[in-house]
Amino acid sequence: MRILVYIDLLAGSATSLSKELIAGALKLAGPSGSVDLAVIGNDAGSVSNLGAGRVLQIQDPRLMHYNPAGHIASIDALIEHTSPDLVLLGYCTAGLDIGPYVAMKRNLPLVSYCTDIRIEGAEVEAESQIYGGKMKATSKISLPAVLVVNPGVYREADVSTAIAEIIHVDAPSGLDRMGIDFIRATEPDLNAIDITKSDRLLCVGRGIGDTDGVENARQAAGLLGAELVGSRPVVDAGWLPKERQVGKSGRKVKPRLYMALGVSGAPEHLEGMASSGTIVAVNSDARAPIFDYAHFGATVDVSDFLEALTEALGK
């Protein structure tokens, strides 16, 4: 079993989701298999000590900043180079760009939003979220295949004493004709609150109801010593500022405590918080996907819970 893992980089370092994928790939490959990491445009040194056997690196000035056309061509070239049995990508912007394209071009089966993966001989059985996480599907497909994996499915890979072999692969042709140009990167406001540094976060979702519910949550967060954050619907409604949004289009956080009130747990939100130390979910819908990731949960009315929590914290 040879597995190729696409490494998503942030400021030159592998993201938490990429480290999770490495751990998952090592588990799936087993002692007799091998894991290759694909690093595009940047130095591979930051991932050489995460347990993989080899790091395949394509360096080119035109690939230094993420460009979907360039990274798609590069991964396609690495698949041609290594002929992997399984290609793993994370559920992130790059994964959603690359996965469907290479699966189509290589005529490989694709399963996205994966929450569990099992290898059975020449087949892979994958569980995945569908309909925004409201339902689960089980797919059995033949290898080779492409999988896009949700965050939180595996624990991050530990630093290894062994250093992977770094192999330099030539950049694919056609980078001068990508059709997409990188203009600039939008940096966050340095004066805004940085929720990624908070040990405790209280997150409100659509189930919080209205602005009164948000204010009640703000009071509880203060008593809890937590920062108040929100899912995308709450931010889109204008109830919280953008810098307090958690999820795919917000910030990725990993606090010691993440309390989710009225959050359904769509894949886009899970991408931003599934690696939190302890997740507490409160939702009146017992089938909400957030409960699949929560360490503790309660199926009660959010406003009733907030009232009781505030009273208890006040004591």
Image (cartoon, rainbow, N blue to C red):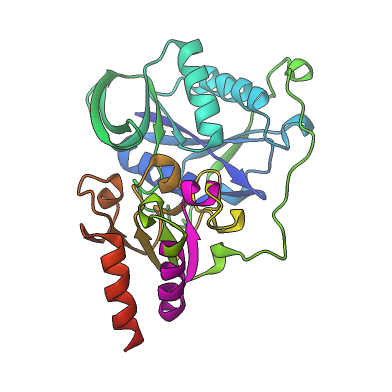
Decide if residue 22 is in sight here: no
Give the camera-side residue of 87 and 225. Answer: 225
Vertical relation: 244 (above or below) 215? above
Quadrant in the picture for residue 301: bottom left
The C terminus is located in which quarter?
Answer: bottom left
Place of residue 38 in the rendered image (x, y in percent of width and height, measured from the top left)? 55, 34
Which residue shows up at 36% across the image and 59% down it? 260
Question: Is 184 left or right of 110, judged from the image as shown?
Answer: right
Rendering coords of residue 306 (x, y %): 32, 69
Prevailing SS of the magenta stretch: helix
Does residue 53 show up? yes
Is 271 displayed left or right of 64 in the figure?
left
Residue 207 position (above or below residue 168): below
The stretch in magenta equals 213-236
Q: Residue at 33% x, 47% y: name it.
A: 264
User: Is 219 colored magenta in this rendering?
Assistant: yes
Count of marks, rendered view: 0
Q: Position of residue 119 (x, y in %)?
A: 25, 30
Residue at 21% x, 61% y: name it: 298
Q: In the depicted view, which residue is nearer to us: 168 or 96?
A: 96
The residue drawn where x is 59% and y is 19% is: 77
Using residue 59 as the reference point, say whether residue 38 is left or right of it. left
Who is closer to the viewer here, 152 or 2?
152
State the quadrant of the N terminus.
top left
Q: x%, y% of residue 55?
A: 55, 38
Image height check: is 307 above or below 153? below
Q: Is residue 250 magenta?
A: no
